[in-house]
Amino acid sequence: MDNPQRVAGIDIGSRSIELVVLNGGSPEHRVKLPTTFDPLAQCMKLMDGVHVSTVVATGYGRRLFADAFDKLRVDVITEIQAYALGARFVYPDVRTVLDIGGQDTKVICLTAAGKVARFEMNDRCAAGTGKFLEFMATALQIPLESFGDFAMRSDRRIPINSMCTVFAESEATSLMARGERPENIAMGLHLAIVRRTVSMLRRVGFEPPLLFAGGVAHNLCVRFILEEHLGHTPHIPEDPDMVGALGAALHARQITAPGPG
């Protein structure tokens, strides 16, 4: 029989899937796999041997998960809800949450009580997302995991005017043909993504403290330029990829908690 104190949250994104298991109020287990071309198979691997009373799914594949795991008690919530809950748990004073993931960028403003006040989400174009950085790292033949460090070795800042991946690649190719250092081109690409992100933050109404989550939070160059543009040091969770899954698990704990009386 499943322990009612053990619940899980799963975040099925475009590049990766994260699972967090809570036992009572504490994270007990966390694991991540790439989404691949078969996200359901990856979900099954993650859930193998996991015994919980409730799972809450979030991310692009949340409905897919709920339909496939109909033998479990499964609920679904939006990424906005999940990231708000997860960020608040990680850093209780947070007022703005930034998530730059593989497929989208989210900015969420929270009230002093931790409720969602406003949000904006870019999910119709790769511009300003992790996919943009991945595409441009491939174009420059730099491993994605090293792209931020590579850009930090630049010796000057050059503008990349296009945020469209196709035109940005063409612009980068032209710069290389003129003899520009690849490190400087990489820095220009990072500057472009941060400028777009800062515009989103200001439109929504940026208020510190800021928590920066999602896969791109691992990128040292994005973190450096973001701090420079905002004049504020963002808080980076120990596992920035896990904030959505953690928030989903926290929601699972809420809906399974016994009511008063």
Image (cartoon, rainbow, N blue to C red):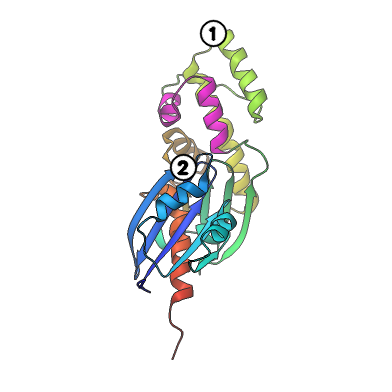
Distance between the Cα atoms at labels 1 and 2? Answer: 31 Å
In the image, what residue occupies the spot 34% across and 71% down? 24
Looking at numbered disc 1 in the image, what kind of residue is underneath it?
Gly
In the image, what residue occupies the spot 36% across and 64% down? 51
Does 145 appear in magenta?
A: yes
Location of the C terminus (image quadrant): bottom left
Q: Taking 224 as reference, is 147 above or below it? A: above
Front in this rendered view, residue 42 or 55: 42
Q: Position of residue 125 (x, y in %)?
A: 66, 39
Q: Residues within 10 Å of mark 1 (few under 14, many from 20)?
A: few
Q: Is residue 181 left or right of residue 32?
A: right
Q: Taking 78 as reference, is 16 above or below it? A: above
Q: Position of residue 195 (x, y in %)?
A: 59, 36
Q: Is residue 162 left or right of residue 207?
A: right
Does 208 appear in magenta?
A: no
Kindly report the secondary structure that dominates the magenta region of the rendered protein: helix
Q: Is residue 250 left or right of residue 127?
A: left
Q: Secondary structure at mark 2?
A: helix
Q: Which residue is mark 2?
A: 215
Question: How many numbered discs?
Answer: 2
Q: Is residue 209 visible?
A: no
Q: Secondary structure at mark 1?
A: loop
- The segment highlighted magenta reads 129-152
Q: Residues within 10 Å of mark 2 (few under 14, many from 20)?
A: some
Q: Position of residue 76 (x, y in %)?
A: 56, 63
Return the mark for residue 179.
1
Location of the N terminus (image quadrant): bottom left
Q: Position of residue 194 (x, y in %)?
A: 55, 37
Observer-side mark, 1 or 2, equals 2
In the image, what residue occupies the spot 51% across and 41% down? 15
